Amino acid sequence: MNVIFDNIPAYLTGFLMTLKLSLVSGILALICGLFLAAFRVSPLTPLRALATTYVELLRNTPLTIVFFFLVFVAPQFGILAPLGFWTAVIALSAYTAAFVCEAVRSGINSVQFGQAEAARAIGLTFGQSLSLVILPQAVRTVIPPLINVFIALAKNTSVAAGFATVELMASGRRLATANPADTVWVLVGVALFYLAITIPAGILAGVVERKVAFAR
Amino acid sequence: MSSLLYDSPGPITRRRERIGSIIGGALVLALVALAVWYAAGRGVFELDRWDVLFDPPKNQSAADVWTSMVLKGLGATLRAAAVAAPLALVAGLLLALLRTARHAWLRLPAVVIIELFRGLPVLLMMFFGLLGFGWDAFGAVVFGLTVYNMAIIAEILRAGLAALPKGQTEAAYAVGLSRTQTLFSILLPQAVRIMLPSLISQLVVLLKDSSLGFIVGYAELLKSIQNNAQYFGNQYFIALFVVGGTIYLVVNITLSRLAVWIQKRSTRTSRGPIAPRV
């Protein structure tokens, strides 16, 4: 147990790195995911096909493979992603963007047909019906699943430990090798730090879900 | 085609869409062409980068390469998944039953276990097995996959039980079934059935997560790609990766399609949603 308190600074360094990874890739994934979702609901077939292919590919690929590609395969044709932090950011945001896209798309699709039809019937333009009728309703349904996507992202940052980024998991592994007698407690410490992110976020998702729930 | 966002287009809009599609298509094609041109410039398509798949150097036969990847690599991946999946299903079912129990002292531990393992990375659980308990890599991978997925499966089954109409339980009690009988012969079969798509997509997640074994030193598919590339030379990384990546995609997309197909087939009865799983 003491091993946790003795190594708080090491944990904190890793924890901050995990937070930084989650934040930067979360923002990037959100931006890319929104663009992908816009492509997926657009009337232009090529854009739709592009976004669908991307989402299907990334959703069925393990995150480890995305990292593996960036670290080992991409350099073979001359793309050298800067090792460590930015490799992790690229892999995590490319992977998470697919899930953001799916969450946003299903949110848009969950708006009832009649809402959009009514908006058009009273003469709202495309932009107006989107910004005044559809998106306000879509955002409500999108936020809880989106929070879940970001919780998964926070957990997924641990994969970066296998690819030369010293975040929470990697510093935990270092501590575990340094304290072979207390490995279980060292890892319990790591677990506590992860829970410090995921449990509040999970509760937030629940609260938001109840707050924005509305009668259909 | 009418969709949520726009009505069926008229002639002007259709022409505009066609022009837009052509421009968009040209842009996408140009991007692909650019990527191919770039890759060709780097010699990606040259034969000596791919011959490892059919005529490998160092006196090895193509069969050796394919055996090491498909039989050993994919075999190890599937073995870990095949051991972890039933364990996770059984443990998840048990947790779901406890979670819906009448007594709080049964419910509470189940809630704690589910919330705990749902909030932790699978990789951390694998390191618990590997470093914490000193197991071998296979045991660690199976442990990590099992404890995480049992928590998710418990939640899926609970959602399935909660989605059933109340009349089912009432009718079962009315014909004199006991609580256990109601659960096992009336509620669970229906809950499993409506949540089958979600359960299958969770299996895809389990299979995907088995690749984390690469990090804890389990010799699965990804590791076999790396081993082959290190033995034959780094220039073969691309060819080997294409094969390995395709194997993952084929297996996972097949399973995902199966989930969607089952969901479509069962729309005539009440259905549960396929929750997006990350």
Image: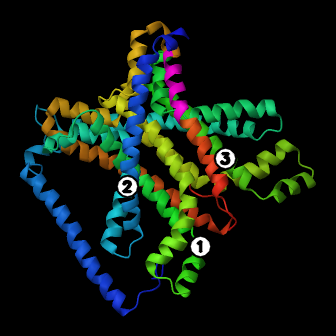
Report which residue position mark 3 lands on.
B157
Report which residue position mark 1 lands on.
A112
Tell me, yes or no, if residue A65 can be seen here.
Answer: yes
- Inter-mark Cα distance, 3 to 2: 34 Å
Question: In front: mark 3 or mark 1?
Answer: 1
Q: In the picture provided, is B6 more to the left or to the right than B56?
A: right
**Amino acid type, mark 3:** Leu
Which of the chains bears the disc numbered 1? A
Q: Secondary structure of the magenta portion, mostly?
A: helix
Which secondary structure lies at badge 2?
helix
Which of the chains bears the disc numbered 3? B
Start-end of magenta stretch: A186-197
The answer to which of A137 and B130 lies nearer the viewer is A137
Report which residue position mark 2 lands on.
A31
**Amino acid type, mark 1:** Gln
Residue A110, quarter of the rendered image: bottom right
**Amino acid type, mark 2:** Ile
Residue A97 lies, in percent from the top left, at 39, 52
As drawn, B193 above or below A84: below
Residue B11 lies, in percent from the top left, at 36, 92
Which secondary structure lies at badge 1?
loop
- Taking the spot 17% from the left edge, 37% from the top edge, the residue there is B61
Which secondary structure lies at badge 3?
helix
The answer to which of A67 and A172 lies nearer the viewer is A172
Same chain shared by disc 3 and disc 1: no
